[in-house]
Image: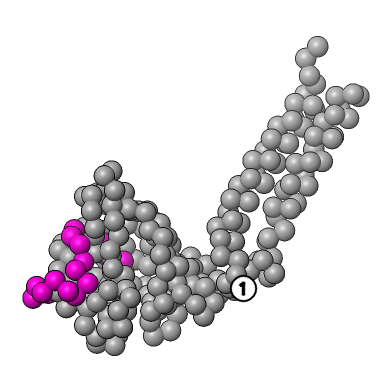
């Protein structure tokens, strides 16, 4: 005997409910990776072209900016990774200007006291040309005088020597070579306490989906017996 149409529809609804709940959990996990800090703001940059990728910046309370993402299409090895002062790169990466340097300092490494605000050091591409980024920085910010939103991320063709290479441009650009990828840093989500104790109003959605996914199979069983 073939199952009835209502029974089949119930099963479909249950499956969709489970899938939706799983998707909600995945999305919510993104904002719960750092439960000890209040996420004030988030931003993202998309790199397009032969070298492409997505990089996310998250401001944790009054603490550091967490930076994570992936860049592909690179030559294996180290590549200079900076925030540049201008965000409009519609005409190419050269339009991004120099490193973001509101305090007029010399170029350096991320851990140096003498550095540009935009000096984020290097990313490292593996043998497949993919660089995985997972770091944090206490000098850049997503707000205030060190704010990087609306500026540009630039990836370079060579390693940043962190101002120590002795080349004429070591103390300005890190002798990092050409600009192979760039993108504008755009706001992703606004200010708000993204913590376990205080989450957005729509944070009840995953619980509702899971409740739905549990109730629907019971209804299906009742219909199957009818």
Q: Is residue 173 visible?
A: no
Query: x, y (%) of residue 137?
Result: 40, 73
The vertical placement of 210 against 164, above or below, is above
Q: Main secondary structure of the magenta part?
A: loop
Q: Is residue 191 visible?
A: yes
Magenta stretch containing residue 39, yes or no?
no
Furthest-top residue in this view: 1
Q: Quadrant of the N terminus?
A: top right
Q: Residue at x 90, y 24 (%)?
A: 225
Write down the quadrant of residue 176 in the picture: bottom left
- Foreground residue, 171 or 142? 171
Q: Residue at x 24, y 60 (%)?
A: 79
Furthest-bottom residue in this view: 103
Q: Quadrant of the C terminus?
A: top right
> Relative to 70, is 15 on the left or the right?
right
> Relative to 219, is 101 on the left or the right?
left
Magenta stretch containing residue 164, yes or no?
yes
Label 1 packing within 10 angstroms: few (<14), some (14-19), many (20+)? some
- Foreground residue, 179 or 124? 124
Q: Which residue is labeled 1 in the image?
A: 193
Q: Residue at x 29, y 48 (%)?
A: 126
What range of the chain is rendered magenta? Answer: 153-169
Q: Which structural element holds mark 1?
A: loop
């Amino acid at each position: 005997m073939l199952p009835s149409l209502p029974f089949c529809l119930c099963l479909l609804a249950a499956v969709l409910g489970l899938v939706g709940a799983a998707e909600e959990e995945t999305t919510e996990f993104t904002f719960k990776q750092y439960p000890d800090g209040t996420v004030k703001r988030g931003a993202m940059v998309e790199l397009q072209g032969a070298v492409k990728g997505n990089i996310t910046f998250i401001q944790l309370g009054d603490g550091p900016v967490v930076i994570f993402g992936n860049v592909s299409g690179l030559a294996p090895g180290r590549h200079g990774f900076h925030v540049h002062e201008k965000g409009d790169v519609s005409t190419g990466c050269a339009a991004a200007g120099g490193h973001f340097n509101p305090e007029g300092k010399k170029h350096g490494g991320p851990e140096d006291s003498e550095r540009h605000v935009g000096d984020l050091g290097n990313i490292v591409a593996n043998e497949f040309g993919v660089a995985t980024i997972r770091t944090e920085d206490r000098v850049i910010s997503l707000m205030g005088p060190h704010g990087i939103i609306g500026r540009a991320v630039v990836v370079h063709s060579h390693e940043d020597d962190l101002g120590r290479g002795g080349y004429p441009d070591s103390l300005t650009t890190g002798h990092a070579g050409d600009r192979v990828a760039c993108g504008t840093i755009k706001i992703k989500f606004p200010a708000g306490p993204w913590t376990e104790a205080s989450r957005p109003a729509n944070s009840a959605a995953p619980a509702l989906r899971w409740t739905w996914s549990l109730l629907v199979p019971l209804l299906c069983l009742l219909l199957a017996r009818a």
